[in-house]
Amino acid sequence: MTDEHLAAYPALAERLQKRGINVEDVKDKLKKQHIETPSWGYGNSGTRFKVFAWPGAARNIHERLADAGYIHKLTGVAPSVAIHIPWDKTEDYSALRQEAQSHGIEIGAVNPNLFQDEEYKLGSVCNPSPATQEQALAHMIECCEIMEKTGSKLLSLWFADGTNYAGQDSVVDRKHRMENALRETYKHLPKGSRMLVEYKFFEPAFFTTDIPDWGTAYALCLKLGDQAQVLVDTGHHAQGTNIPMIVAYLLDEGKLGGFHFNARQYADDDLIVGTTNPFELFNIFHELVSAGDKAKDVAYMIDQSHNIEPKLEAMLQSVIHCQVAYAKALLVDRKALAEAQRGGDVLGAYRVMMEAYDTDVRPLLAKVRQEMGIDPDPIGVYRKDDYARRVAKERGVASGALGGFPG
């Protein structure tokens, strides 16, 4: 199909030009797209019921870096990898940084693990035990130090903290503990870096969650300062939540720091981004494109724990879906859209959006990849390549999971 896509590109480019779309500008933006992949997505991880081991799944940070470098080689737009501590803990982080660079990538966000230790049964920084609070705080400060050594500019924070029963703990006291912990951690952020505060409306706690929604995360960030911003995980919302609207609001406030891209059908976020609601993903990217410079520092990260899918192919598909959504968002005729909006033309505005969403952007992406010097068909290359077969033979099938489910 790739030859057909490349052959279809001239006609597509002509149609887009007639619609007033600057195709060269669109291609330039697509070439600069940056989607960060997560180290844990390359290892055995997934649901809390059963983790199915995959042949060749990465067993340590070194293999995870190699896999991330391979995905970047195929796509050209995944030049960094997020790490999770202690899953990716190592003795020499400066050497780890160099190792990543040898694979053509950089170390991205550093994610502290604040949900797996036995002491965290009643929470981490919000735990009623001062000793456990100190343990969690020390770990976050340790991750700030790791940022310095790896060159990371992002501290990505998700807390499993919450309660299961009414009266289990004081909601207000837990709020104060969270504020104190974030305030202390904020002091240790490396210069020029950012703290991204994630939220999740429920789970693993079922009565209260200490950062349950974007408003709570936003309020916390306002108290901390300019280096603190909200992280939106696309799978962390109640059914029917309008995520594009949240994105637009936070962008306008200068408080949208980044994303964890994934998809969900019901209550968790382990599915490949764009598989359950691609129109929602398109609308999210539309708001990002519409925001212009206000979105220039937003970090685009994937957070998925593939359980029944091939690890590498699932990650590759995730990156491609982000490319597709971004490409379609870039094709919205914003002049026509603004005119329809000003004139109160409800269906006219809707049709402008659908014109872009319904466009087959595969020819455009194939041309962009060709101009970047990579194969226009990443999936085809992956399926023909021997990388996955080779690592499966070398690594075998590792027993056990990388860790519990990440936020």
Image: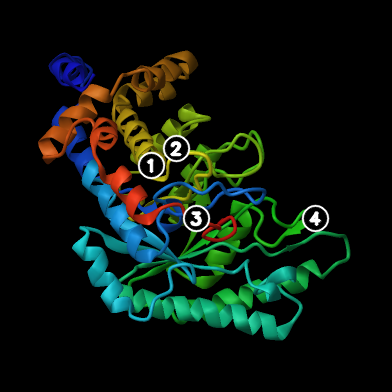
Q: Which residue is mark 3?
A: 231
Q: Is residue 128 left or right of residue 305?
A: right
Confirm or deny contact between disc 4 and disc 2 (CB under 8 A).
Answer: no
For the C terminus, give its image quadrant.
bottom right
* Numbered circle sitting on residue 207: 4
- Spatial distance from mark 4 to mark 2, Cα to Cα? 30 Å
Give the mark nearest the N terminus, 3 or 1. Answer: 3
Q: Which residue is mark 1?
A: 288
Residue at point 45%, 81% (across, down) = 188
Give the mark nearest the N terminus, 4 or 1. Answer: 4
Residue 126: give x, y in percent of width and height. 69, 72
Residue 226: give x, y in percent of width and height. 43, 68
Few, some or many C-alpha atoms within 10 Å of disc 3 (few <14, some 14-19, many ≥20)?
many
The amino acid sitting under disc 1 is Leu
Confirm or deny contact between disc 2 and disc 1 (CB under 8 A).
Answer: yes
Residue 173: give x, y in percent of width and height. 76, 74
The amino acid sitting under disc 2 is Ile
For the N terminus, give its image quadrant.
top left
- Spatial distance from mark 2 to mark 3, Cα to Cα? 14 Å
Residue at point 36%, 70% (across, down) = 193
Q: Which residue is mark 2?
A: 284
The amino acid sitting under disc 4 is Phe
